[in-house]
Image (tube, coloured by chain):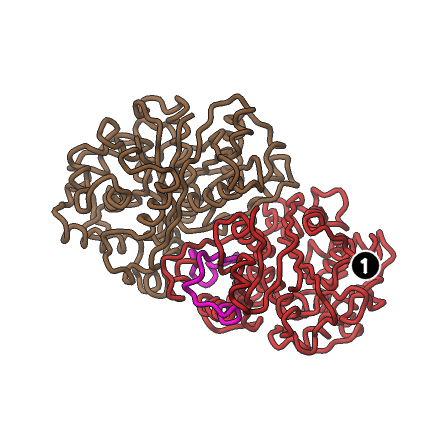
Chain colours: A brown, B red
Amino acid sequence: MTNSVCVLGAGSTRYGKLNESIIEIALNAAKGAIDSAGITPKEIQAGYISNVFGVADKQVHMAPVLMSNLGIPNVPGLTIESACGSGSVMFREAYANVAAGFYDCLLALGVEKVTHTGTTQSTTLFSYCSDFFYEGGNGASFPGLFASIARAYLTTHKATEEDLAYVAVKNHDNGLLNPKAHIRKKITVEDVMNSPVVASPLKVFDCCPFSDGASAVILCTEEFAKRSGKPYMKVIGSGRGASPAAVQGRADITTIPSTVAAAKQAYKMAGLRPEDIDFAEVHDCFTIAEVIDVEDLGFFKKGTGAQAAREGATRRDGRIPINPSGGLKSKGHPIGATGIGQVVEVFEQFTGAAGDRTVKDAEIALTHNFGATGASAAVHIFQKV
Amino acid sequence: MTNSVCVLGAGSTRYGKLNESIIEIALNAAKGAIDSAGITPKEIQAGYISNVFGVADKQVHMAPVLMSNLGIPNVPGLTIESACGSGSVMFREAYANVAAGFYDCLLALGVEKVTHTGTTQSTTLFSYCSDFFYEGGNGASFPGLFASIARAYLTTHKATEEDLAYVAVKNHDNGLLNPKAHIRKKITVEDVMNSPVVASPLKVFDCCPFSDGASAVILCTEEFAKRSGKPYMKVIGSGRGASPAAVQGRADITTIPSTVAAAKQAYKMAGLRPEDIDFAEVHDCFTIAEVIDVEDLGFFKKGTGAQAAREGATRRDGRIPINPSGGLKSKGHPIGATGIGQVVEVFEQFTGAAGDRTVKDAEIALTHNFGATGASAAVHIFQKV
């Protein structure tokens, strides 16, 4: 590991229901990142793509198609999949390749398009991300699995369904300030509590939407970044973790082992503690997930994550702002893109492009993204330069 | 790049129509590799999976499921996809991670299960690996695309359909000696010439089959390999390349730019020339592909690859044995596994496990595997220790 690795540019499409093809969606994000970095496509040496259900839009083997459309058909690429954590797991591989000196500059791009298949087909496809033999194949969808987790949490700790609602309200408040967010709608705790039950105790407003979208960043050595004269940020921590694939295989389902392991590794590499982080983008596919994340990442003591949301500690002006972008809940969750979208948010925050949702005086940020119910996860820490 | 990287163990299922689930198929190969390496699962630090159509058996996000089933649920993994070249592209990433010092020992496993979907659905799925906008979506299936390539080759160079048939006959001869091969059947040039036309000039016996199967290797540092006391081989060359995604975007369709680039990089790293290679496993999805491969890899001059097959230069006792395993043509082509299956063959050849198909006195071997019509490719070179 010889190189200091930096993010030099970032681009993203709007998240939501998009009508373009998956390739057009990806290209829009790629062009945004390339423009933002002030480079030409010819400076890109490799393409790292994250995507889960390319089959839904009839295109896998996406890297050659993207590179060809960018006018750099001889640049090698690949696709990495790790369910909803694909983006962060791919980012980790891209990071490792630059750190190790294999490439000086690469494109890391996440993309997903599923909304055109409809809710039933999307839910079916997504269930293939679970341990299908034990979970999806027996009718345990992700809302059902996270409902079990939520029920266990509410039973074990001093927390209520209303506490969870505060997570949704806060993320919608943030997303309202994000022009690229999927669901820009102010909601109240009452709205959440009165929304239809999906899988008790989770209601519609406890769940993130199915989204289409793409996000991309340019990853490079610090030498390369410096030469560009453009603003950049450093990757100072990177960690990965894994959990038993099926929820039933875990000793305690109110914590996610992969998050704990990935965070430990990332903090160690950065030489930092949770209290050194100025804000974080975390994986809030359901409100309960964010509550567990902020505990597993060390921001709050076990059993106090829900209370933290109620008390406003995770709001943009709170002790540790969580998901200033709006998170998966409001910004949206195009599953292959989500992990890269988090990095885009950090880049925009650090380079003065986050507008009214800017977290004041932030210099260190963390991203956390997991797959399925946390079977895989990656955590990264970034420093403003 | 600090570490010398080695292959310590290898395992493979039979290739063909398999009835087990994709996870069971993968586990069988994983256990074979682990046993062959003489390690315990707990020594594995990461799982690199290659797979394209997990959706066909309702399981993506395969690494956590595999690791959980191996009793190592906390070991992180991921899936890499690059169409039919997934195995070699994944092997390259796994290699890079060990070379760079991120891991000392990992499992690199390729798997595919598609035959249960039937030929029509498999053909449809596979077409998503092409540039779907230009190719698959307009009815250009892979047999059709390779037929165009074959027609261009036969028109440009002094070669006949009969010359192509010799590739099939040779690979079937080799596959007959491989107990894990999909199609173990001796055929003659006449059999090939008289078989039904799929897409002229390609006939049934010019095409590889749809196969299920998994192959796995243990990849580790040389230090780790030495400590094991087991036989191992070194990875001495690694290269990747890319071509315009759609065949129509290439200046000359009788050569594959990704192969040429990947080979150049691998030879340079190994400090070797084509004439130093004792045998090679190459990507013969269609007979014409092997003819082009052996030219692009530098074994034969442009336009003489077909003649080489006719003259027996690529037979097991020829100047440069090609596909002693039987190749994709006879051993089979479970697309996510193929690139790793090639490495398994080299390992078996180098460790005295190849039986009657052993290439005499072989010490240096090359593997070559590409995706789609060669939009992506990787080449690796191995040395017997």
User: On the rendered structure, is B82 left or right of A253?
Assistant: right
Residue at 36 percent of width and 44 percent of height: A369
B151 is within the stretch colored magenta: no
Give amino acid for label 1.
Gly
| Stretch of the chain drawn in magenta | B34-62
Image height of A150 relative to A349, above or below = below
The answer to which of B73 and B175 lies nearer the viewer is: B73
Q: Which residue is mark 1?
A: B305
**Position above or below: B188 against A23:** below
For the point 85% across and 67% down, the residue is B311
**Residue A123 seen in the current view:** yes
Q: What SS does tag 1 mark? A: helix
Quadrant where the C terminus of chain B is found in the figure:
bottom right
Give the residue at x 68% y 47%: B265
Residue B164 point in image, percent of width and height: 79, 64
Q: Specify whether residue B162 is in view.
A: no
Looking at the picture, tell me which residue is in the foreground, A68 or A257.
A257
- The quarter of the picture where residue A353 lies is top left
